[in-house]
Amino acid sequence: MKIVCNWSDDSIWGVVPYMHKSLEVFNDDASNEVLMNGAAWIYNHDIKKQFKDYKRRCLLALWSPCEFTSRTGYYHFDHYDFFTDVYCVCPFTCKFMNEHYGYEKFKYIPYPFTNYSVTEFGNYDADCSWMGSIHGQDHISAIDTLMLFNYKFITSQKNTWMHHPYEFHMCTHVDLSPDDKLIELSRCKSSLSFNMIYMSPSSRKNDFDVFDRFDEGIMPQFKVRTHEITSSKSLMLVKKDPWNLIEDFYEPEKEFIYFEDFTELKDIISDLSNNFEKYEGIIENAYRRYQDYTVEKIYQYIKSDDDSLITWSNKHV
């Protein structure tokens, strides 16, 4: 496949560098099939029209379900007509788009991720970490809990318009390079994962009943952070939510630990800080499972379009 990337409208603090590094080795300029990576391919007709005669025009939709909440005007559902296949990380988006638009093109995949940064494991210097930004009360409660221990709070930038003052006062690492971010993560015995978008219902762009808890200001979104944690051999602690998309890819108690509230989170971190050896098997199990979701593995599935290569659950589709 020909691999083309345009990340002009994507966050560069995320997995952008890793995605390109992994995909570019597969580029075949002579192919009549193209894989497009980046949100710009949806709405920028000028950059994608050069591929209109290709046999397969595939899109990696790694931002979903943000298209149902965007206030930017960038996402237009009819723009997906251009693509023959859309590989999407949100099962609810796949189901809605296929049912309501008569498509069969939306296909549910894990967030592809390959960790090139961490080459040494087990050099722990912190009990716990949170990597991200403050977007809701859960995140504030999480930081309050982590601060009871030897913690790291890794964030992209301090005190921007959309972020909480906690990021300015409580963060321990800010604006790290992608490599350094993952190396710091690998030095934490445990790391938190929230697989939700926290938002105001007023930001809803369309009247589509895709998500049953939208009015509560939450919606499901599987985060690449899960693979960043497991590939760095940090114990993944996952906040239980109404959807639990994490279970499509990882098995609870065997490959990660759930917590339902922050009292329970405190107890878990306290235990692992003193009895870490009993959690090491979970970390190793998760590391092995992560290797099913590398960019290389997901690319092979996309290229072949062979459902026999699916190693994840489709129970939410």
Image (tube, helix red, strand yellow):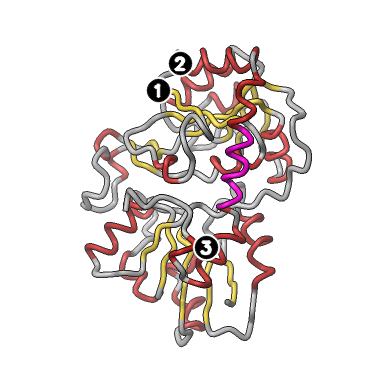
Residue 215 appears left or right of 63: left
Residue occupied by mark 2: 264
Picture coordinates of residue 209, whole percent (x, y): 21, 49
Type of the residue with mark 3: Gly
Residue 272 appears left or right of 203: right
Mark in the foreground, 2 or 3: 2
2 or 3: tag closer to the N-terminus:
3
Picture coordinates of residue 223, whole percent (x, y): 49, 43
Type of the residue with mark 1: Glu
Asked whether the residues under the numbered discs 1 and 2 touch, taking CB atoms below 8 Å apart as contact, a structural biologist would say yes
Type of the residue with mark 2: Glu
Q: Residue at x 51, y 33 (%)?
A: 193
Q: Nearer the viewer, residue 251 or 183?
A: 251
Q: Nearer the viewer, residue 176 or 31?
A: 31
Residue occupied by mark 1: 260
CA distance separating discs 3 and 1: 34 Å
Report whether residue 71 is seen: no
- Stretch of the chain drawn in magenta: 283-292
- In the rendered image, residue 286 lying in the magenta stretch gets the answer yes
Q: Residue at x 68, y 40 (%)?
A: 182
Residue 90 appears left or right of 175: left
Residue occupied by mark 3: 38
Please determine whether, in this image, residue 179 is positioned above or below residue 1.
above
Residue 174 appears left or right of 215: right
Q: Residue 130 — which label?
A: none
